[in-house]
Image (cartoon, rainbow, N blue to C red):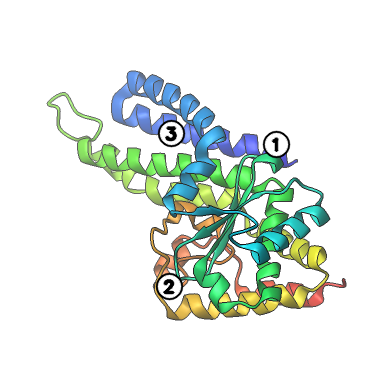
Amino acid sequence: MEAAKTVFLLTALTVLFVWIGGMIGGQMGMLIAFVIAVGMNFFSYFNSDKLVLKHYNAVEVNENQAKGLYDMVRRLSERAETPMPKVYIIPDHVPNAFATGRNHSNAAVAVTEGLLEILNDNEVEGVLAHEMSHVKHYDILVGTIAATIAGAIAMLANFGMMFGGGSSENRPNPIVMIALMFLAPMAASIVQMAVSRNREFMADEGAARLTGHPEWLQSALIKLDNYSRGHAVMHEATPATAHMFIVNPFSGKDISFKALFSTHPKTEDRLARLEKLKI
């Protein structure tokens, strides 16, 4: 089922990308977009994790550099029966975390300095368990590839807005311009399909079962949610990658913006589901 969902998502993104190319450049534009899309899918599959980690200036750490953090990830990977992922720290004081990579053998878990500063060890382990659950269920494959392609769609849409489809007088086509105005939010909506709210609930449940302590994740979510509502947005945060984090990095923005990029369930709902779990 997860493989089918992945194929469906990537197909939908590719079709949208090719359609935009056709709107901008006709049949030749569609052909060029198709070739680019195929190459992008191939490139994203092998490199999207590296691009996301580089975008957030994540620094890989080993057991000697961050023993406590490294030991937690190793313990959780053993319980999840997955290979040990690489461990990264993001130099940002806004607390958050995400996982990335195309499969179990090429996974990475990244946490911000801020997360390590405001959470205690049990809460950090609850967050890491959530991310390891995403790794175990291949959520990260869909998320990382979708983030790369959705970002390209947004850029292509902006290109179309600037130059249009062109009329016989080489002027922007107003119909193309109006259509492209909606492509950025469409791209964001498709990204939301990549890691649905249901998958976030599943990752929360998986975290609770990996640690045996749902209250650890509950406590972490409360702190992270409270922080995100009253402080600045993460540096370098983008809507295309917002779905990857354990809490939406744009939670502190205005209501209309949050509604547009609502990639996560309400924290209250996540806490309620964790409360009902029988571990």
Q: CA distance from mark 1 to mark 2?
A: 34 Å
The percent position of residue 128, horizontal first and vertical second, equals 67, 63
Task: Indicate the quadrant containing the C terminus: top left, top right, bottom left or bottom right.
Answer: bottom right
In the image, residue 95 sits, relative to residue 155, either above or below, namely below
N-terminal label among 1 and 2: 1
In the image, which disc is placed on residue 255?
A: 2
At x 50% / y 30%, what residue is drawn? 43
Amino acid on which disc 2 is placed: Ile
Left-right relation of 161 to 204: left
Give the residue displayed 62% in from the left and 42% down from the top.
141
Going from the N terminus, do you reach mark 2 or mark 3 first? 3
Instruction: Work out whether mark 3 precedes mark 1 in sequence or the reverse, and give the earlier one.
Output: 1
Rendered residue at 68%/71% (across/down):
270
Q: 10 Å neighbourhood of mark 3: few (<14), some, or many (≥20)?
A: many
Mark 2 touching mark 3, by CB under 8 A?
Answer: no
Q: Residue 182's x, y, as percent? A: 37, 48
Q: Which is more toward the observer, 205 or 130?
A: 130
Kindly identify which residue carries mark 1. Answer: 4
Check the image and name the residue furthest to the left.
Answer: 169
User: Could you tell me the amino acid type at mark 3?
Assistant: Phe
84 over 127 or under it: above or below: above
Q: Please indicate whether residue 180 sits to the left or right of residue 15 in the image.
A: left
Check disc 3 and report its element: helix, strand or loop: helix
Q: Which residue is mark 3?
A: 17
- Establish if 193 lies above or below 209: above
